Amino acid sequence: MRLLFIRHGQTQPNADDVIDTRIPGPILTPLGDEQAAALPHALADEDIGALWVSSMVRTHLTAEPLARARGLVPAQRHGLHEIQAPEWELSDDPSHIDAYYDVVLSWAHGELDRPMPGGESGQDFFARYDAVIEEAVQTGRDAGLETVAIIGHGTAIRCWTARRTDNLDAATLGQRPLENTGVVVLEETQEGTRPWTCRSWMGEPISGVGVHAPIGPGGELFR
C-alpha cells in the first residue's frame, strides 16, 4: 500500500504567517487555487484509487480538481484536521508560533502527555490520526487499491510521519518543510509502531507553482 500525503493549497493566513487552525477555516487564495488545479497533471503517473480529506474547507477545495479528474468522491474524516492552537488563534506573534511548534516537536520526540495549551495532547493527536489512517488503508486494501491520497495539513503530516516511518524522525524534522500542495510518498513496509517508509518528500514541486511563496504556520522550518 502507498500513501500520498498532500498538503492543502495556500490560504491567506499561510501567506500572512498567521496561525489559523480553526474549523472549517478559510478558503484558498488565488495562488492556492492554482496549486490545486496543478495537482491532476503533477500526479498523473500515480494510481490514486481513493481521496481522503479533513473537516477543514481548504482540503476540500484542494481535492476538487484531482477528484474531478479521477472520478472520485473524497471521504471526509474529522480526525485528519490540523493540530489546533486554541490560545494562539489568528496570532502572528513569532513567540506564539515558536511555542506552538515547541509543543508539536515535543510530541515528535515522544512527549505525548504534553498538552497544546487549551487543546489536545500528543496522545490525543496520534489516536485520532492513526484511526483515520488505519481506516483509509484497510478500506483501500478491501477495494484492491494500490494508492490512497490524503489531503491534509502541514504540521499534522510532519508530526505524524516523524513517528510512524522508519526513516524519518524528530531530529531531522526541522529540515523537512512542507510547501502548500507538497507531496509526501509513503510505502507500507512492516508492522509495528513504524510501519511506513518515506520514499519521497516533496521530491517534485507541484509544477513549480508557489514554490517560493510564503508557506506560513504548518509548513515552515521549526525555529
Image (cartoon, rainbow, N blue to C red):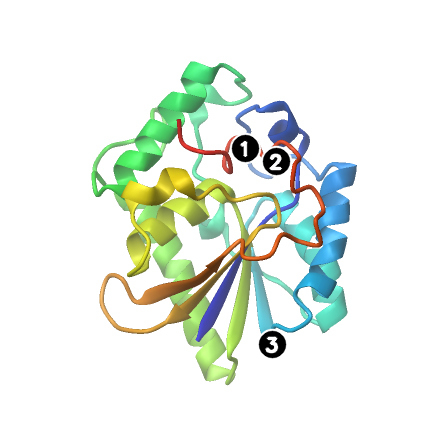
Q: Residues within 10 Å of mark 1 (few under 14, many from 20)?
A: some
Question: Residue at point 24% right, 61% down?
Answer: 193
For the question of whether residue 128 can be seen, the reply is no
Near-viewer residue (208 or 39): 208
Residue drawn at 21 percent across, 38 percent down: 111
10 Å crowding of disc 2: few (<14), some (14-19), many (20+) = some
41 vs 160: above or below = below
Residue 4 lies, with reference to residue 88, above or below; the image says: below
Q: Which residue is mark 3?
A: 47
| Residue 202 position in % (x across, y down) | 54, 53
The reply, left or right, for residue 45 in relation to residue 95 is right
Image quarter in which the N terminus is found: bottom left
| Crowd band around label 3 with a 10 angstrom C-alpha radius: few (<14), some (14–19), many (20+) | some
- The reply, left or right, for residue 170 in relation to residue 33 is left
Q: Which residue is mark 2?
A: 25
Q: Is 103 placed above or below 201 here? A: above
Label 3 secondary element: loop
| Badge 1 amino acid | Arg
Q: Image check: 172 left or right of 158? A: left
Which residue sits at x=44%, y=23%? Answer: 97
Which residue corresponds to mark 1? 22
Q: Does the CB distance between marks 3 and 2 fall below 8 Å?
A: no
Residue 13 visible in rendering: yes
Q: Which is closer to the viewer, label 3 or label 2? A: 3
Q: Secondary structure at mark 2?
A: loop
